[in-house]
Image (cartoon, rainbow, N blue to C red):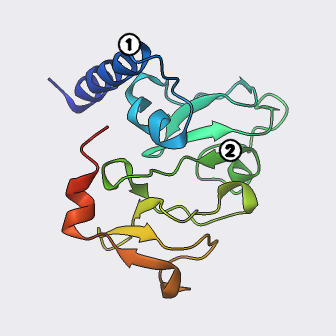
Amino acid sequence: MDDKTLNALSSAIFVSRCALAGEAVDTDDKRIRASGLYPEWKAGKHSKGETYNADGQTWECFQEYDNAVYPDIRPGESAWYTFNRPLHGATPETARPFVPVQGAHDMYRAGEYMIWTDGSIQRCKEDTNHSPEDYPEAWEEATAAQQGESGGE
């Protein structure tokens, strides 16, 4: 079984468990856990609230756009961040690679996790729009206890 299929299967199990418990997939962390079910981003019309995967991240469209009108809104391009925000994990298991903050819509909040450029998992200690390199006081490396305590749900 390849990684994409395994991710889709584990996402389907997570979403099913949420449904059985009467819970919605309504937080960034839950959306990341369900990310194997989201489509890969493709050029086209995108609506506010739409969720998709691109460049190893799960993104939410927070401002409607149409690539037929604005072809430069693509993953990795500067215009991308004006319309999309990366989801941030609330556990070490849902940490995603660090994405430089572009505005208040995508700042890291206290208690969120990310994977820093050296491969370490970092926990945000206070709301910040800075990286661990630019403002180390806002970040701490996740401890082994933190990495084991979330339990995968």
Q: In the image, residue 51 lies at what x, y percent?
A: 59, 31
- Between residue 23 and residue 89, name the one nearer to us: 23
Q: Secondary structure at mark 2?
A: strand
> Horizontal placement of 71 versus 90: left or right?
right
Label 2 or label 1, whichever comes before in sequence order: 1
Q: Which residue is mark 1?
A: 20
Return the mark for residue 149: none
> What x and y, as percent, mark residue 65?
80, 33
- Mark 2 vs mark 1, CA separation in Å: 31 Å
Quadrant (top left, top right, bottom left, bottom right) of the N terminus: top left
- Three-letter amino acid code at disc 2? Asn
Left/right placement of residue 151 relative to residue 12 reads left
Residue type at numbered disc 1:
Leu
Q: Could you classify mark 2 by the number of other residues whose Cα lies within 10 Å: few (under 14), some (14-19), or many (20 or more)?
A: many
Q: Which of the 4 image quadrants contains residue 16?
A: top left
Question: In the rendering, at what x and y percent does residue 30 appear?
Answer: 46, 35
- What residue does disc 2 label? 84
